[in-house]
Image (cartoon, rainbow, N blue to C red):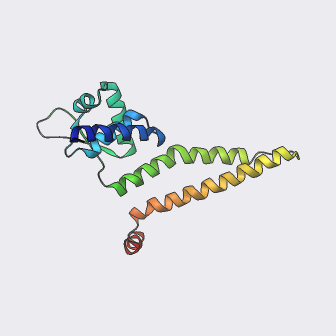
Amino acid sequence: MEFKEAKNKFVQSWGALGSQWGINKTMAQIHALLMISVAPISMEDIMEELQISRGNASMNLRALMDWGIVYKEYKPGERKEFFIAEKDLDELAVKIAKERSKREVKPALKVLKDVSTIKTNTSEEEQHFVEQTSKLYDFVLKADNVLDKMTEYKDNWLAKLVVKIMK
């Protein structure tokens, strides 16, 4: 397989995986392209490489920057904006985990808390509903807390030391 074919295969595959991770295909393809690029890339080059419109490129670049995994870079003497992806895979994983928790898990927790605290009559169906949704709330809350603890280690020198020792 030649480099160009391998690069295209990676970008297309990363795009397909993106939809399973909660982001759209184009956003994941832009991220893939920036992640494997040696140097920052202009929006025009991204548009050409992926055959997408300016609006599509702009909207998805903004979303990637909001996630904190793509950055704008300026080059002296250039009017174009250039973009580069986070290259540190540990940092990338932490940022994605935090963003997904904020966008998906926290809203789900709110809904679970609301529905599991309804006033019930004595019907078996209502009691079962409250019991099951309460269990689900507790489980998701514990999972979210574990995720929070795992992502906090990057800011905690003691946890970093423990992780380093464990490696």
Q: Is residue 162 above or below residue 150?
A: below
Look at the image and tell me in which quarter the C terminus lies: bottom left
- Could you tell whether 7 is left or right of 68 in the image? left
Check the image and name the residue furthest to the left: 77
Left or right of 87 on screen, residue 149:
right
Please state the horizontal and vertical placement of residue 100, each as a whole percent of the image. 48, 46
Q: Residue at x 27, y 29 (%)?
A: 47
Residue at the farthest right position: 122
Give the quarter of the image for residue 164. bottom left
**Looking at the picture, does residue 102 appear above or below residue 54?**
below
Quadrant in the picture for the N terminus: top left
Q: Which residue ends up furthest to the front in the rendered image? A: 1
Q: Position of residue 25 (x, y in %)?
A: 40, 34
Residue 106 in view in this figure: yes
Report x, y in % for residue 165. 38, 75
Q: Is residue 63 visible?
A: no
Taking 82 as reference, is 117 above or below it? below
Number of disc labels: 0
Residue at figure coordinates x 76%, y 48% from the top left: 130
| Towards the viewer: 68 or 96 | 96
Seen at 31% across and 55% down, the residue is 88
